[in-house]
Amino acid sequence: MFNIYLSLTTLPIRLSSDHFKKVYNSLLNQSIPFTKLIINLSIKEFTYDIPKYLYDNENVILHETNICGPCTKLIGSIDIIPDDSIVIILDDDIVMRNNFIKSLYDSYLINPSKVTSHFTSVRNNYNEVAGFGGYIFNINNLRNIKQFYTTMPECCIKIDDNWISWCIHKLGIDVINTVEKDPWNTVLDIPSTETHPEWYELCKNTNRDKLIAEMEKILK
């Protein structure tokens, strides 16, 4: 089996919350274990209070980076993951059932040259990933994605999935769905997820349509 790296980013208020520990425990409880969990910390933007349980786990990498914004969950770790590793990108607030990694990994094995996502949407002539449900790829296929970060338009900062998907498309990599039929109910633990505190959420607290329209005018 390949080495499997989970990668996410988070905000200080979330990292120190009981809900984040619930997310973390759900990742520890997977039927297929991860090799390393990378928590990308945007130290250029924030100061973090790191919970002791994260320091105590040798399989957790607390990665300090100058990359900023939600895209840090991918761009922040792209340089530290070894060649030929499998990467799963996920959000910091979704509690997962114990088949989360297995569901993505099984689908990856069918199409290892593609990016496979539990949820996709169509944008222009390509599919987009959805970070909240997780997506998987071989690091070799997206190693060069960081080149786009230096020219990322400001409007893309809060629509990271849309921007990342555009970058994947520019690299000539296809995004496809997993073979999982109903991941919302069979992979994501929505009842446990919905108990999270009231906090800022990109999907609810940003004018996504406006930002996406701006992105489409700038990026071709």
Image (spheres, rainbow, N blue to C red):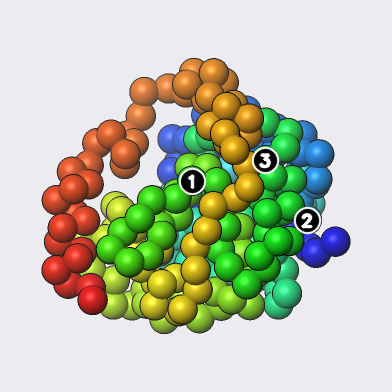
Q: Position of residue 61 (x, y in %)?
A: 67, 56
Decide: few, some or many residues near mark 1? Use Cα within 10 Å; few <14, some 14-19, many ≥20: many
Q: Is residue 62 left or right of residue 45?
A: right
Decide: few, some or many residues near mark 3? Use Cα within 10 Å; few <14, some 14-19, many ≥20: many
Q: What kind of residue is marked 1?
A: Phe
Q: Position of residue 195 (x, y in %)?
A: 49, 18
Looking at the image, which residue is at 67% across and 31% down? 97
Residue 161, which numbered label? none
Q: Is residue 143 above or below residue 18?
A: below
Q: Would residue 32 be visible to someone looking at this image?
A: yes
Residue 35, which numbered label? 2
Q: Is residue 214 above or below residue 20?
A: below
Residue located beneath label 1 in the image: 119
Q: Nearer the viewer, residue 30 or 120?
A: 120
Q: What kind of residue is marked 3?
A: Phe
Residue 100, which numbered label? 3
Q: Which residue lies most toward the right here? A: 1
Point out the frontmost of discs 1 and 2. 1
Q: What kind of residue is marked 2?
A: Thr
Q: Position of residue 205 (x, y in %)?
A: 24, 36
Q: Nearer the viewer, residue 13 or 38?
A: 38
Q: Real-space Cα distance between discs 2 and 3?
A: 14 Å
Point out the frontmost of discs 2 and 3. 3
